[in-house]
Image (cartoon, grey):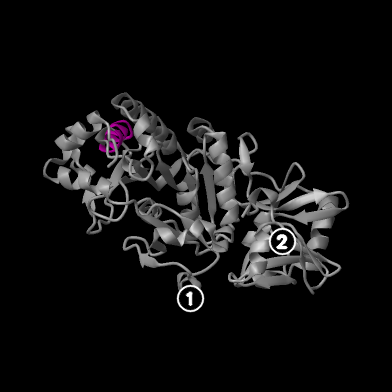
Amino acid sequence: MLNLPKDFLEKMSSLLKEDYDLFIKSYKSPKVQGIRINTLKIDIENFLNINPFHLESIPWVDEGFFFEEKDKPGKHPYHDAGLYYIQEPSAMTVGTVLNPKPGEKILDLCAAPGGKSTHIASRLQGKGILVSNEIIPSRAKILSQNIERMGIKNCIVTNESPENLSKIFKGYFHKILVDAPCSGEGMFRKNPEAIKEWNLKNVSFCADRQLNILNSAAEMLMPEGILVYSTCTFSPEENEGVIDKFLKKNKNFEIQRVNTYKYFDNGKPQWINSTNENLKNTIRLWPHKLKGEGHYIAILKKRDDNIYTTRKAKKIKPLKLKNNLKDFYDFCNNFLTKTPEGNYFLFGEHLYISPLEITDFTKLKVLRPGWHLGTFKKNRFEPSHALALSLKSTEVKNTIPFKSSSEEIYLYLKGESLKINAKKGWSLVLIDGYSIGWSKISNNTLKNHYPKGLRWNV
């Protein structure tokens, strides 16, 4: 049994009343874990055909599956190939509730480590724009790595404050997700370290910060747009309380009903003494009622009532690279079946394709300005790991196919060279038909281009 804070226990006892004993009993149960299939790279049926794990469907997420602790999916090559994302089952609900549609412009404002962003991207299916933001630099780097691993092309990763973003993206997005930093009460079972950081004063601090983030998000949403607010805490001050205060200030927003599932509860306006009965249309996920941790979710819609005007965003201009692109085109002609097309953007020596409709982000701190194609070296172009992970086997001329059961794929992931009879030049390494990285063949030797920072040590 976890050593839960006394103030927390007293608070939950007063809130839950007859449900309190069941709630406390849930902390004696082992945490549950899930994977979410990355439908950008593989559809659900095809994954289940090659699935090496003991999976059980998560009822509220089509792409989600519980796995058993003995499976260890983080140590399987499919994880490195980006075929799935390991994500807490309750957290998967948020991406489903946001309901991204191909072609939409979406902002994930507090995105690290990337579970919800990668879920959004899989639903966008490469069409539209995703801006994934994280204010803490170290976490933004992890976010960028996960965007790369999942083979996402239409995402810009920023490292900015919500206030700075709102100056650039006024009324720009169809949908915004605010998965707000919180006191983390819902993660106590999953992450016992969160218990040490919890106190009542921090709950109040989090609530103030969440309201400020929501106010910035409101400025970036276009009329008739959808804003989804979520936390992984039970605290009413950070959930119904924040939404109640936000709505009192932002009269042009209204709560939309979240489609309930039998495992979900409605929000509790009485817990904050609110007269807004629409708070019952928000939802709570409880660890004693489902196989997952604690979550709160609210959907807000921005009415088009001309209270706020939308400023036309300045679009970023395509760069004219001409001579620089020659080496890139040579690479494409020699090794790809089709040249990637779009708005080329040079970021130092790195070549990207930025989403065509993206606003000018050059005044922001940007870690990843789109689809990373590769790097210009002296008299040559070297393809990126991001390009490899986003390509299908039919999009390259040369492939090196490995089975997940073979010794070669593990040697490749360790960074070793291999003797192989294959065509000279760049080849895409495949695991059971899905891309996992680059190799370069010379003199019947596979020269390993799997990134050094990702190589397996065992």
Q: Which residue is mark 1?
A: 49
Q: Are marks 2 and 1 in contact (CB under 8 Å)?
A: no
Kindly report the secondary structure that dominates the magenta region of the rendered protein: helix
Toward the front, the furthest residue is: 458
Q: Nearest the camera: 341 or 204?
A: 204
Q: Residue at x 44, y 42 (%)?
A: 221
Residue 267 in percent (x, y) is at 22, 44
Q: Amino acid at mark 1?
A: Asn
- Image quarter where the N terminus lies is top left
Q: Is residue 272 visible?
A: no
Q: Amino acid at mark 2?
A: Trp
Does residue 244 show up magenta in the picture? yes
- Report which quarter residue 382 is drawn in: bottom right
Toward the left, the furthest residue is: 18
Q: Residue at x 29, y 39 (%)?
A: 2
Q: Residue at x 41, y 36 (%)?
A: 181
The magenta segment? 238-250
- Image quarter where the C terminus lies is bottom right
Q: Which residue is mark 2?
A: 438
